[in-house]
C-alpha cells in the first residue's frame, strides 16, 4: 500500500472546506492523514469539526505576535512538526509572509471564492454582482507570493442568476468548493499535478488552462 500523505490544514472560521477534506479522507477518496489543524482564531467552528474527527488542533492567535514574521515563524514551527506533504489553506484569512510561502514552495495550496484572476481579496460575491458577471465560481491554486496569486489547478464555475444575492452566491459557490478541493488535493498527493520551476504539470504535461468543474462534472480542457 502506498504511504499516506501527511496534510496540515489551516483555518480561520467555519471550516466547511476542512469538513469536506475530513470526509474525503474518511471515505478513502484521499490516501492521506490530516496530522493537525491550525487556527488563528480560538473560536473557529472548524476546531470542533477537527476534534470530532480526532485530529490534533492548535490555536496560534495572530494577535499574540508583534509582527507577521513572528506569527508566521510560530506557524512554521507548529506545521513542521507534522512534516507535511501538503499545507492546505481552507478559509485561512491571514496574509502570509514571503518567508512562509517560500518555506512551503510547491506544497502550499489555497481555495479562493472567485474565478481567478478575477476578484482577488475580499467581497468576491458582491463584486460579481456589481459588475454584472454572468458566471462566478471558485479556484484552487498553489500559493504565489502576491495575494491570491499562483498557478490555478481547477476552477468550479456556476451561472449567476437574476435572483442571486451575495449570500446565495456564497452558499452556491461553497457547495462547489467542497467538490473541487478534494479533487485538487487528490491530484497533488497522487503525484498527478505538480509544480516544476513554477510550471504546473498534469501527468507530466504542462497544464496551461485550469481544469474546469461544471454542472457536476470535471471537464479537462475548455
Ligand atoms: C470559503 O469560501 C473560502 O473559499 C474562503 O473563505 C471561505 C471559508 O469557508 N477563502 C478565502 O476567501 C481566502 N481568500 P469555510 O471556513 O467554511 O471553509
Image (cartoon, rainbow, N blue to C red):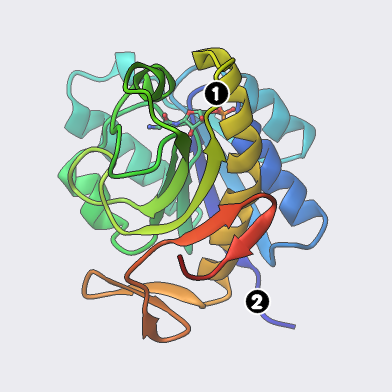
- Residue 132 image-quadrant placement: top left
In the rendered image, is residue 182 in sight?
yes
Quarter of the image that includes the N terminus: bottom right
Q: Is residue 179 left or right of residue 92?
A: right
Q: Residues within 10 Å of mark 1 (few under 14, many from 20)?
A: many
Q: Residue at x 29, y 38 (%)?
A: 118
Quarter of the image that includes the C terminus: bottom left
Measuring from the top left, give residue 115's x and y in whole percent: 39, 42
Label 1 residue near ligand 1, CB within 8 Å: yes
Label 2 residue near ligand 1, CB within 8 Å: no
Mark 2 and mark 1: span between their CA atoms? Answer: 36 Å
Q: Is residue 46 left or right of residue 70?
A: right
Answer above or below: position of 98 versus 14.
below
Q: Nearer the viewer, mark 2 or mark 1?
A: 1
Disc ID at residue 211: none
Cβ atoms at labels 2 and 1 below 8 Å apart:
no
Q: Which residue is mark 2?
A: 3
Measuring from the top left, give residue 129's x and y in whole percent: 41, 19
Residue lying at the far right in this picture: please name it: 27
Q: Residue at x 26, y 37 (%)?
A: 96
Measuring from the top left, give residue 54's x and y in whole percent: 76, 39
Q: Nearer the viewer, residue 79 or 88?
A: 88
Disc ID at residue 170: 1
Answer above or below: position of 186 versus 156.
below
Measuring from the top left, give residue 109's x and y in whole percent: 41, 52
Q: Secondary structure at mark 1?
A: helix
Answer above or below: position of 90 versus 125.
below
Q: Residues within 10 Å of mark 2 (few under 14, many from 20)?
A: few
Q: Residue at x 53, y 13 (%)?
A: 165
Amino acid at each position: 500500500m502506498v504511504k499516506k500523505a501527511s496534510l496540515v490544514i489551516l483555518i480561520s472560521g467555519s471550516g466547511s472546506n476542512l469538513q469536506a477534506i475530513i470526509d474525503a479522507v474518511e471515505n478513502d477518496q484521499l490516501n492521506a492523514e490530516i496530522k493537525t489543524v491550525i487556527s488563528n482564531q480560538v473560536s473557529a467552528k472548524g476546531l470542533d469539526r477537527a476534534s470530532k474527527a480526532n485530529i490534533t488542533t492548535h490555536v496560534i492567535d495572530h494577535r499574540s505576535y508583534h509582527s507577521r514574521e513572528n506569527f508566521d515563524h510560530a506557524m512554521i514551527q507548529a506545521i513542521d512538526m507534522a512534516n507535511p506533504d501538503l499545507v492546505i489553506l481552507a478559509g485561512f484569512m491571514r496574509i502570509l509572509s514571503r518567508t512562509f510561502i517560500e518555506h512551503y514552495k510547491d506544497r502550499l495550496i489555497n481555495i479562493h471564492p472567485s474565478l481567478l484572476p478575477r476578484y482577488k481579496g475580499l467581497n468576491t460575491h458582491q463584486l460579481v454582482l456589481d459588475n454584472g458577471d454572468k458566471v462566478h465560481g471558485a479556484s484552487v491554486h498553489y500559493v504565489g507570493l502576491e495575494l491570491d496569486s499562483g498557478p490555478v489547478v481547477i476552477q468550479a464555475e456556476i451561472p449567476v442568476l437574476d435572483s442571486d444575492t451575495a449570500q446565495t452566491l456564497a452558499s452556491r459557490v461553497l457547495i462547489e468548493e467542497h467538490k473541487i478541493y478534494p479533487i485538487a488535493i487528490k491530484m497533488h498527493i497522487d503525484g498527478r499535478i505538480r509544480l516544476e520551476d513554477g510550471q504546473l504539470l498534469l501527468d507530466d504535461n504542462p497544464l496551461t488552462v485550469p481544469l474546469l468543474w461544471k454542472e457536476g462534472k470535471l471537464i479537462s480542457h475548455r
